[in-house]
């Protein structure tokens, strides 16, 4: 043991990741799906994919760097070649049916792992927001991020941020911090085109945990299609609540200006304490757009920071506040007292910001550097 952080074995934990995948059944499940592609492959494709994931954790930034696993040859055997990795990935991205089969295999393994989590002493990790435990609610956070392309990769194009690359859309389970689904998209894709991604994310949630879902989507620009799809997910056996960022227009600004000062309530911090510089209010009955969209609107105001002052609208400059609006269908959330209050809805949506940690983690785990120039390989 050393205390100076020198001479350490950086790859010592790789075996735990591999054993976790093996014992949870992921390696075998992927191998069973991909075995249909070839009658007698030299390499089990499930082993190749899991080994690639382990290599990425160890710092691999290309398919060639699967050779990092050579340090663990006594445990894993000699690593596959980069051409073997490519042959494993390419048919996945080229076959939508195969992607569905892999998604089903992942969902089956996840259901098993969640049973193991539930059997622990602490049980399943329900979220706590403003001192309220969201018992029974599985929370899905959807967000998009820019992935830069530093070479001429297939599908790379100009992004809305005037960079060059891709704009993948991902969904995470906030309870367990797992990545549920990832959709590779070209650069110009919008930040809120999440409608087609919803079913893929929900399909990864074990069936017994789909009764109560909360879906949070950040970013201004909610669309009719997105909100209608979210509302349409409700069934007699499933309750779906959502919070979505809402782009402020002149109509919204006029509605905010019409609010009496007395209706504003202090905002809350994540621990439930009062926020010193923020306030929230119900905007639904004042804003005629809310009726047309059949949704509830909650508005938040905060004193603008120095950075925010440069992007304030004329209305915000005159008012001296920075405004944001949340669209939601939350009337009440079962087993969550006070969930109908605007203060709680505001802090509930703002806790979606933790998704930025998931984005950073995914980029550190390989998303930042797509491995190939070929779209189907990157998709796989």
Image (cartoon, rainbow, N blue to C red):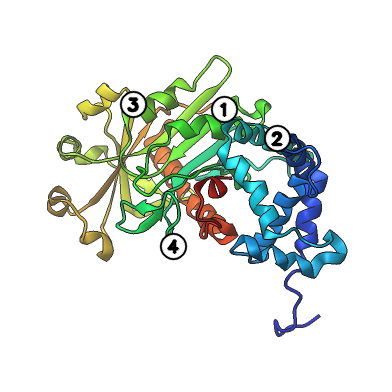
CA separation, marks 4 and 3?
43 Å
Nearer to us of marks 3 and 2 is 2
Residue 245 position in % (x across, y down): 35, 40
Which is nearer the N-term, disc 1 or disc 3? 1
Q: Circle 4 — which element?
A: loop
**Residue annotated with mark 1:** 212
- Check if mark 4's residue and mark 1's residue have beta carbons within 8 Å: no
Look at the numbered discs 3 and 2 and tell me whether their residues touch, using CB distance below 8 Å.
no
Return the residue at label 3: 295
Earlier residue among tags 4 and 1: 4
Residue drawn at 39 percent across, 42 percent down: 346
- 339 vs 14, left or right, is left
Q: Nearer the viewer, residue 330 or 262?
A: 330
Residue that numbered label 4 is attached to: 151
Front label number (2 vs 4):
4
- Residue 310 visible from this viewpoint: yes
User: Which residue position holds label 2?
Assistant: 105
Could you say which quadrant of the image residue 264 lies in?
top left
* View extreme (top): residue: 236
Question: Real-space Cα distance between discs 2 and 4?
Answer: 33 Å
Between 187 and 364, the residue placed more toward the observer is: 187
Residue at 42% x, 59% y: name it.
152
Sequence-earlier tag: 2 or 4: 2
User: Is the residue under label 3 in contact with that under label 4 (CB below 8 Å)?
Assistant: no
């Amino acid at each position: 043991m050393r205390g100076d952080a020198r001479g350490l074995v950086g790859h010592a934990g790789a075996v735990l990741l591999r054993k976790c995948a093996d014992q949870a059944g992921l390696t075998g499940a992927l191998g069973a799906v991909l075995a249909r592609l070839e009658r007698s492959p030299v390499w089990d494709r499930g082993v190749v994919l899991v080994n690639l994931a382990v290599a990425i954790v160890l710092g691999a930034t290309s398919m060639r760097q699967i050779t990092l696993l050579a340090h663990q040859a006594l445990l894993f055997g000699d690593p596959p070649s980069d051409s073997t990795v490519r042959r494993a990935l390419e048919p996945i991205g080229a076959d939508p049916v195969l992607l569905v089969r892999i998604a089903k295999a992942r969902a089956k393994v996840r259901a098993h792992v969640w049973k193991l989590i539930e059997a622990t002493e602490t049980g399943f990790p329900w979220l706590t927001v403003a001192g309220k435990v969201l018992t029974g609610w599985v929370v899905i956070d959807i967000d998009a991020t820019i992935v830069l392309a530093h070479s001429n990769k297939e599908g790379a194009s100009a992004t809305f941020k005037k960079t060059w690359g891709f704009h993948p859309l991902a969904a995470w389970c906030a309870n367990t911090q797992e990545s549920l689904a990832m959709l590779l998209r070209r650069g110009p894709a919008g930040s809120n085109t999440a409608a087609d991604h919803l079913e893929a994310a929900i399909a990864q949630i074990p069936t017994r945990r789909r009764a109560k879902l909360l879906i949070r989507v950040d970013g201004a620009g909610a669309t009719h299609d997105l909100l209608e799809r979210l509302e349409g997910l409700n069934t007699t056996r499933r309750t779906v609540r959502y919070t979505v960022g809402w782009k402020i227009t002149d109509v919204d600004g006029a509605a905010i200006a019409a609010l009496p000062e007395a209706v504003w309530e202090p905002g809350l911090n994540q621990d439930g304490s009062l926020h010193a510089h923020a306030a929230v209010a119900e905007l639904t009955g004042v804003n005629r757009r809310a009726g047309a969209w059949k949704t509830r609107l909650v508005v938040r105001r905060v004193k603008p920071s120095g950075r925010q002052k440069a992007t304030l609208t004329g209305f915000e400059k005159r008012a001296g506040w920075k405004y944001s609006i949340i669209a939601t269908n939350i009337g009440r959330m079962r087993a969550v007292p006070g969930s109908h209050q605007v203060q709680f809805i505001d802090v509930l949506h703002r806790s979606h910001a933790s998704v930025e940690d998931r984005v950073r983690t995914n980029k550190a785990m390989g998303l930042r550097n797509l491995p190939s120039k070929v779209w189907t390989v990157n998709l796989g």
